[in-house]
Image (cartoon, rainbow, N blue to C red):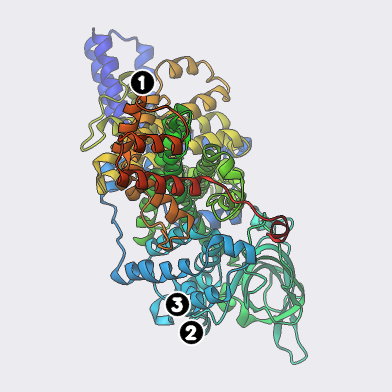
Amino acid sequence: METLIFILILLIFAFYAYPAILWFAFIGIYSLIFFDMSIAFWIIFVILAIVILNTEVRKHFFIKNILNFIKNKNLVPNISKTEQEALEAGTNFIEEDFFKGEVDFEKVKNQKNITLTQEEEEFLDNKVDELCKIESDWQIFQNRDISKKSWEFIKSNKFFGMIIPKEYGGLGFSATAHSKVIEKLVSRSQVLAITIMVPNSLGPAELILKHGTKKQKDHYLPRLATAQEIPCFALTEPNAGSDATSITSSGEIFKDDKGKLKIKLNFEKRYITLGNIATLIGLAFVLKDPNNLFSQNEDLGITFAIIDSKTKGVDNSNRHDPLGIPFVNSPLFGKDVIIDFENIIGGEEGIGKGWQMLVESLSIGRGISLPSVSLGGSKLALKVVNSYTQLREQFGLSINKFEGIEEKIAKIAAFTYLLNASRNYTLDAIDSGIKPAVINSVMKYHSTEKFREIINDSMDILGGAGIIRGEKNLLAHAYFALPISITVEGANILTRNLMQFGQGLIKSHPYLYKQVIAIKNNDINSLDKALTNHIKSAISLSIKSLIYFLTRGLVINTKGEFKQYKRKLVWASTSFASLTNITLAILGANIKKKENISARLADILSWLYLITSTIREYENNTKKQDRILVDYICKYGFYKIQEAREDIIQNIPFLKLLNLFIRSNPIGIKPEDKLNKKIIDLLNDENNVNNLCDNLFIPNDKNEILYKLQEALILQKDAIEIFERIKYAIKHQTIKKSSFLDMIEESHNKGVITNEEYEKLKILFEKRMEVINVDYFNDKVYKKQR
């Protein structure tokens, strides 16, 4: 019994990470009272106590040798200068808690909830709607460009100046407003959204605003706000895509005939949005000073400059064709382009600061722009698919009644809620001054990947109606454009396999970066502090993870809604942090090379964030009908966490046997089929659908297909009672089961339905057939189509 009590108390000490002095005091006193220990035990005990508790002795005997061992065996990942700059760009967010094995639900809930100002609301409800009304997505595709009228409207209403402060003539909108504008625009046309998105995220305005000189801000920002200047951002090259540090575009410092220092540029860029029509190019290049005219260093690093596109030697006359999506995307070429030092963003102070500027700018696109595009597209897909499947019948049933269709629609609805929840949480952080670089990578990857699943499922559901292009097909162009969002701002494979966990591990782990820097600087004092705290934390996390596993988290105290899921979140977070430490201990510096393991750890980290965001959204914006969607997301998310844990353990030496235990007590299983039916029932109420799909552009033009789709659905819902009477008449053989028109004709003749009801059903039939039928074209017209 004494031994069991002894072990239990030690577990409590480990669980709460009590200081080492308490451990030794307890072990010594307890052993003296209850155990008959040998002299050898006490000698070892005293030696260990002296070595571990005495800081100077510990540093001399342990830490110094550990430092030498780590350096000799190369057990710590090397951090390059560019990696360190990336780590220093941006701030930590909730992922920092996940690496500690914690989830502070009060802090999550109380993160400032940003709402739109009256000015932002009015812009969204008026100017954005007016722009959407000018032309349809189909018209933009047929013309291969936005119309002149749309361009003029965009420029005159400062759509390119949303992020530029009012003092410089811009709109000065919040990140939330910026996101909602893009979200609504994409529900009308991805071309519109991309055209307006890029100047407001990745581009000269963002760089000048944050890093430009006062002269640059005063000159360029007002011109960018009113679209007197059309900007583009020239980064990607044939051999430098996701690895932006590999750019070869170069600038060489030289003296002109008057003895003034200038820069000669040579570059080849590709995939540059708005490049073909840009008047102002934000160019990334490597600046060199071979003759040491400016600096003692020959290689001055990645630098950004602002270049007039009409400068001699610049060629932006060509266009790319990104899968037929007609937004402006171009290669850019520069041959012996001469610029002044004043063209460098930030002036001389900006030399060599390009990589840090880049990391910050990319973070904005990942956290705001692409998630907004995915969310707007997802809402449109849900609206279209939900309406279509209620109107379309097969075997006498609306196709949303089939389990296979139910499963896909349920996932589309749940993912749409998930994307909205995570978008809101991320934007609330950004608008509060946080720069969540790691979470922005999570958002980029998961928003685009979830949108990919949503569109693919939608195409499966629509069948033939999804594959025939024309004005009636609202999702085909989104399907075509999917690989673009997957690819831009860091390919998704790289984002998942290298960036999310890899960057988060160094940046957000409570002790690892401190240890890396201490080892790099041979700082024994700092290493001692960081390493001892890390060991203490690792022991605590291991014990917590074990106890939570054995109790399924029931010992965790949580408050408010969804206590079960909150307990699982803490359990999963503790398990993640513990698994991270174990992986580090086994793989050491090789963890950078184990991309698949890094990717699976990233999956766990991501789902911790996505589930947390979902619960927060419900608690801050409670709609009881959405509870079923939260259930689905949480179950699905914990199921994905379970999958990732099993795959990690299966691929790490010495850990495979643990899967026997992990699988016997899973943290999550796939959502049950009955949830699908409940979500379909939820979506049968159009008010619930409208809540999920808020901020869509819904045209009021009766000739528009989305208007017709909603009109037909309303007519069908109004006729439910009439259909019930006809079904009753068929069942009792008052009328024969035949085609729709024949049945309503016979029902009318036999008095089953009134004249008014008969006319109503004829109109419904016409409206329904109009939206179910697909487009077709005269042969000559078809050959001219784009």
Q: Secondary structure under badge 3? A: loop
Compare marks 3 and 1 and give the one earlier in the sequence. 1
Which residue sits furthest bottom? 258
Which residue shows up at 56% across the image and 62% down it?
191
Which image quarter holds the C terminus? bottom right
Which residue shows up at 73% across the image and 62% down it?
248
Nearest the viewer among 260 and 270 is 270
Residue on which disc 1 sits: 45
How far across and how far down the image is residue 50, in percent? Answer: 36, 29
Q: Secondary structure under badge 1? A: helix
Residue on which disc 3 sits: 157
Please state which amino acid type lies under the numbered disc 1. Answer: Phe
Nearest the viewer among 398 and 382 is 398
Residue on which disc 2 sits: 218
Pointer 1: residues within 10 angstroms few (<14), some, or many (20+)?
Answer: some
In the rendered image, is residue 553 in sight? yes
How far across and how far down the image is residue 434, in percent? Answer: 38, 58
